[in-house]
Every structure is written in C-alpha cells, then in structure tokens.
Image (cartoon, grey):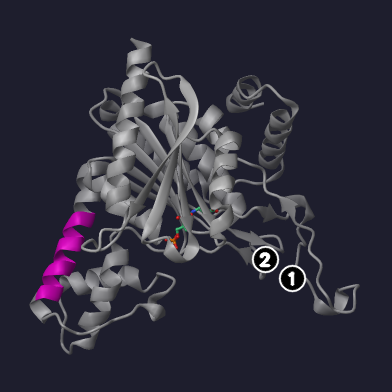
Amino acid sequence: MSPSTKKRKSDVGGDEDEDEDVRKCNQFFADTPEPSNVDVIKHSLDVYFSTHHEHLRNGNKKIAFITSGGTSAPLEKPPMAVRFLDNFSSGARGAALCEYLSKEGYCVVSLRRTGSKMPFIRKCEKLFAKTKKKKNVHNEHVDFLSMFTSTTSDNNTTEIGEDEENEEDLLSKLKSIQADRHRAYTEHGFLEIEFTTVYEYLHLLRLVSEKVNAYANDVIIIHAAAVSDFYIPWSELASHKIQSNALETSGNLFANFSSTPKMLKMCRDVWSPNAFCVSFKLETDASIIEQKTLSAMEKYNMHCIVANELDKRYDEVTLFQKEEHEEGKKTGAVDALRLLRDPGEEDIEKQLVDELKRRHEAHAAARRKLAS
Ligand code: PAZ
C-alpha cells in the first residue's frame, strides 16, 4: 500500500458513500497501468521542483496547477485502440488561465490534452494565419511559432477575419507573444505535461497534485479539463480492434461503460489538502446548472466552482463559493458572482484570474493565520 493510499483511507472517512468512492478510486489505480512515459514525467517534475522548491517553500512564489482539454475513453486497449469516447474541450480556457497566472508571477504546471490549445500559441494561430495570407512574410517569430500551430487541433477552423493589420503590426504581436512565452518558461517556471486517455489523466492528476502539495505552500489547482463520466475499466477493454462481424447483436455495438471514479474529492481532501481548489461545471441546459453546481460543491468539497454554459462560456461564467466566517468556518450560505466578459477585452479569463487570485490569496492568508 502506498503512503498516499494509507492517508486516503484515514482522511476521507465518514459515511459509507464516501468510503465506497475511495474504494473505487483505489481500485482504479490498482487496476490501471501508469502512462508509458511516466518515468520521463516524474523526472521532469523532480527537475522542476528542485529548481523552484525554495521559492515555493518560503512563500516567495505561488504555484498554479491547471488541467485542460478533454479526456478520451478508449473502447479498445491502448496502444492498440482505434475507437474512443471523447469529451469536448478545445483547451482554450485552460491555456488562457495558464498564461494569465504565469503573467501574475505564478509557477505554472499545465496538464493538457495532447493536440488541444497551447498556452501562448493559442493567440498566435489567428495572427499566424494572417501572416500566411501575406506573401513573403518570413521571419524568425513566424517560423518558430508555426512549429507549434501545426500541432493544434482546430487550425483549419481558425477564422482569419478582415485583413486590417499591416505586416509590421502582425509581426510585432507575434514577437510579443513569443517574448511572453519565453519569460513564462525561463523566469516564472512553466511546466507542460500531456495526456490523452482518461487513464493517463487520472494517474497524472494524482501524481502532480501530490507533488505540488509536497513542495509548495501556496497552491491553486484549477480543474478546467473535461473528464469523461464514463469509461471502460482497463481489464474489460478489448485487446484488439472490435470486429463488426463478431458483434452478437446483428451488427449493433453495445459497450459496457462504468462510471469514472470521482477523483475531485480525493484531490481536494487527500492528495493536495492545502491547495485552494477550483473546478468547472459545464452544462448545456441552463435550467439545471445552478442545482448541479451546488450538488457538486457538496460532493467534492471544492473551494470554488465556476459554472459555465457551453455556448456562452467565453462571455459569461458564475463563481460559486461557500461563505466563511472570519475564523475560516463555513456559514453554510453559498455566494454566487457572475462575471461577464468586458466587451473591450479579448477574453474573459483575465477577469477570472483576477478573481481567483484574490480568492486564493484570502484562502492562503486564512491558512497562515490558523497556523500561527
Ligand atoms: O476547453 P474550452 O475552452 O473549449 O472549454 C472550457 C470548458 C467548457 C471545457 C471548461 O470551462 C469547463 O467547464 N470544464 C469542465 C467541464 C466539465 O464539467 O466536465
């Protein structure tokens, strides 16, 4: 039994449902292999924390761990899988949060779906498309950034829009994106880790959550990834491509999906109990969003949940958080704050980061007061 498993058992006790959730989470990790590149990722994390842990420990630096993109739940066993149940998420929200938190001086660890929007690069896709429209525009910034844009998922759908900008403006914007990106990696500490499947995602979520908890005092974890609610347990996956002529029921495919173990509560209570934990709630039906968010708040014990509707997600979000007394005790009331994108702003994530940063600071100050 790993140390974290022991801790999990004793820390998340209480009612039977919770025990059952913990059992399912433990079962998942016992039954599911780690990502094939986990040693490389562990090494990157060790190097990252040996570089930054002093500042993170003595309070000079805060760290943000941000997940983004959708998980993929295969029907066949990776790496031989050819069919998948995918959760929608372009990764744009998470990428923007990484950028703004890095600009605020946070060390950032990004856990991102391979092929989804990349921090900094997301902004230059449109600009880059414009430079391609202009003949003979070639310089080091275009060439450097274009290496990344070719790997993002929806390049083809990037709207180019009116070609109002002149060549110099475009190049200077690209140059400034590249400078921001460089600063994030070299000055602030920026680490990118990628996942594709829900198996990889959950293993890496636990790994990074435990690491940030071990090495840093002021941690914010933002769960912006869209994680599949259903998956096929590893041991039940078909070993080879499912053959249509082998299906018993006249060619119809019936896949037996299980509920994905609920890991948010493990992350909050066990892996990273000191962190300020934020998750997102996505719905397409506006009439159920508040009730679903409040119920998630009870279930997962998040500090803050950001609710968003799919089609309005870049213009409007609502932050739900339990009110607290001065001494840190919850009053039971839930406070809701609606943020609307400022029409003059490119995106809503800057406003969101300002608000989350303020709340994280208040949380960290309350923890320090309690400890003193
Ligand atoms: O990745 P994106 O920018 O296309 O969309 C962001 C989002 C809607 C995936 C995110 O804001 C979110 O709600 N994530 C949690 C999804 C969920 O409830 O499963």
Say which residue label 1 marks: 241
- Circle 1 crowding by C-alpha within 10 Å: few under 14, some 14–19, many from 20: few
Image location (x, y in percent) of residue 212: 41, 33
Start and end of the magenta stretch?
A: 169-181
Residue in the image at 60% along x and 46% along y? 34
Residue 57 location in percent, x, y? 31, 24
Towards the viewer: 311 or 74: 311
Q: Is residue 22 above or below residue 128?
A: above
**Mark closer to the chain start, 2 or 1:** 2
Question: Relative to 142, does residue 281 appear above or below in the rendering?
Answer: above
Q: Which of the 4 image quarters holds residue 109?
A: top left
Density class for disc 2 (Cα within 10 Å; few <14, some 14-19, many ≥20) is: few
Mark 1 residue type: Lys
User: Where does the C terminus fall, quadrant-wise?
Assistant: top left
Q: Which residue bears the numbered disc 2?
A: 80
Residue positioned 74% across, 70% down in the render = 241
User: Residue 168, image x and y in percent?
Assistant: 8, 76
What amino acid is found at the position of numbered circle 2 in the picture?
A: Met
Direction from residue 23 to residue 92 in the image, left or right = left
> Which residue sits furthest left?
168
Q: Is residue 209 above or below residue 114?
A: above
- Residue lying farthest to the bottom in this orientation: 135
Residue 336: image x %, image y %?
Answer: 42, 41
Vertical side of 114 occupied by 264: above or below: above
User: Is residue 118 rendered to the left or right of residue 6?
Assistant: left
